[in-house]
Amino acid sequence: MALVKIVKAFVRDNEECPYEDFLNQVRKGAQGVGRILALVDRLREFGFELARNNCIDCVEGKIWELKPGPFRIFFFAKGDVFILLNGYRKKSVKIPRKHLDKARRLHGEAS
């Protein structure tokens, strides 16, 4: 059994939480939130071992993406803590530049 990690959402100085904003958007569609939260729990339990199951991928540098179904959530690790940054609904093979740019900015703020 893997060591349990800490998973938390990044909150900006102005109290904005891009991950929670994303979850609220998904909730409006009424499908997918359970899938997202279940995979976040698996990240907490198994950490980077999820890469073996193709549930996470390294996007660039220290930025990773969690892949619950058609959704993608950017995150990074800081010690034993996984910091959730932002998310989007996947509609194409490539990562949309605006979402990756936002993840880069948030990673810079959180580091």
Image (cartoon, grey):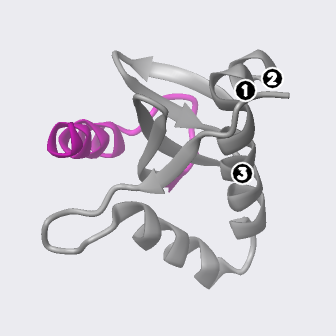
Residue lying at 65% horizontally and 30% vertically, measured from the top left: 47
Q: Where is residue 16 in the image (x, y as percent from the top left)?
A: 25, 72
Please report contact status of discs 3 and 2: CB closer than 8 Å, yes or no: no
Residue sitting at 50 percent across and 19 percent down? 58
Choose between 85 and 48: the one closer to the eye: 48
Q: How crowded is mark 3: few (under 14 residues within 10 Å), some or many (20 or more)?
A: some
Which amino acid, by three-letter code, is at mark 1? Answer: Leu
What x and y, as percent, mark residue 61?
34, 15
Relative to 81, 107 lies left or right:
left
- The kind of residue tagged 2 is Asn
Query: Which residue is located at x 24 percent, y 36 percent?
Result: 104
- Above or below residue 60? Residue 41 is below
Say the numbered circle drawn on residue 6.
none
Q: Specify the label residue 53 is tagged with.
A: 2
Q: Disc 1 marks which residue?
A: 50
User: Is 28 left or right of 36, judged from the image as shown?
Assistant: left
Tell me, yes or no, whether the two marked residues, 2 and 1, touch with CB atoms within 8 Å.
Answer: yes
Q: Nearer the viewer, mark 3 or mark 2?
A: 3
Give the amino acid at mark 3.
Asp
Magenta segment includes 94? yes
For the N terminus, the quadrant is top right
Q: Please state the extent of the stretch shown in magenta in the rendering.
A: 88-111
In percent of width and height, residue 95 lies at 45, 33
Q: Quadrant of the C terminus?
A: top left
Query: Which residue is labeled 3 in the image?
Result: 41
Position of 6 relative to 22 (above/below) = above
Q: Is mark 3 on a helix, strand or loop?
A: helix
